[in-house]
Amino acid sequence: MIHLYVNYPEQTPCYRSVSEALSSLPEIELLPQAFPAPGEPQAEPVTVHIAPGIYEELLVVERPYVTFLGEDALKTVLSFHLGAFEAMPDGSRRGTFRTASVRVHAHNFTARNITFQNTAGYGHTVGQALALYADGDRLVLENCRLISSQDTLFTAPLPPTAAKPGGFTGPGEHAPRINNRQYYVNCFIQGDVDFIFGGAIAYFQGCTIFSKKPGDRKPPESPADEVIYGYATAASTPKDLPFGYVFENCCFDSDCPPRSVYLGRPWREWAKTVLLRCSLGSHIHPAGWNDWGKPHDHFYYGEYLCTGEGAAASERAAFSHLLSDNEAALYTVQNVLGEPDGWNPQVTCSPQSPCADR
């Protein structure tokens, strides 16, 4: 095990930045991404101990078995400020997938007690702004915060093709589409439009999903008496996968007006998203889900024993599902994330109940 220390002066050597620490690692042969991730380390595991502070730097992790370890997510912040509308040197726009403050392109990455942040601004002024580009199998985030506006967290892989030419321009455009599995426990994720999106199988347990009111933006035109401020999720689950996004015991909270945010919409037509025992605030639109013009018999949206003002089933979209006890029993962490190699992610804490005081 290699231990690296950032801004811990009592440790030798002591690195001044996370990028400096990562660049100190000995070079290894980076094997092509494959699924599932190798069960045994293909490189010596690395823990990067990051002292409290705000680290303004672009970070890329391409080595497997790396852990970012902070002391307190509120105090250890990895931050940058790129937005999709920015002009590149050739005059083109930066685009969504070149904005990430932190990009992980490696298997078996773990982060604990860290904030991943993009401070570019609101989506309607700067475009998409990723805090974390998570492209890896068996990825775990524990007690972390992910903060931005539009497209905060990208859970790779990308869909097979872009809807428009150049839509996927960026470091992962030609990368193999890996069936990544990712586990987020006791995390706080904030954004406004499609701020959790992508094709990974991702399990969110004990997390707060906070829909942020998008500044002074005038809401887009919508049906009479409706003001839509955002969408929490936009899954693009590959067609052949049995699971997509699962939220268990999560708190969907917001500072948006009532009935103004959808739980999700399908970025691609086979999207799958299920909520189990979640607390849904009054900001959730009565329909719950938006079809984004996709065929209703392709995507899957389901809920089970959800509570709160936004959980009423009486006006839910007809294409959504209320799960039975037997159906809900399939959505355990190990069942969702365990195939094909029996992966059962280990964390250092128990999942919380973030909305227990409601």
Image (cartoon, rainbow, N blue to C red):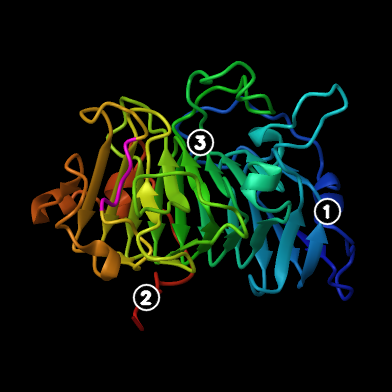
Q: Is residue 55 visible?
A: yes
Q: What range is drawn magenta here?
A: 287-291
Question: Residue 141, how many percent across, how many down?
Answer: 53, 57
Question: Residue 249, how many percent across, how many down?
Answer: 32, 66
Other residues around mark 1 within 10 Å, as few (<14) / some (14–19) / many (≥20): some
Q: Is residue 138 visible?
A: no
What amino acid type should be assigned to the residue bearing mark 3? Pro
Residue in the picture at 36% in, 52% down: 263
Mark pair 1, 2: CA separation: 37 Å
Mark 3 secondary-structure assignment: loop
Instruction: Determine the main secondary structure of the stretch shown in magenta.
Output: loop
Mark pair 1, 3: CA separation: 25 Å
Instruction: Assign the C terminus to one quadrant of the image.
Output: bottom left
Q: From the viewer's perspective, tell me whether residue 48 is left or right of residue 356.
A: right
Q: Is residue 288 magenta?
A: yes
Q: Nearer the viewer, mark 1 or mark 3?
A: 1
Identify the residue position indicated by label 2 in the image. 355
- Decide which of 172, 111 is in the foreground and name it: 172
Mark 2 and mark 3 lie on one chain; the one further toward the N terminus is 3
What amino acid type should be assigned to the residue bearing mark 1? Ala
Identify the residue position indicated by label 3 in the image. 38
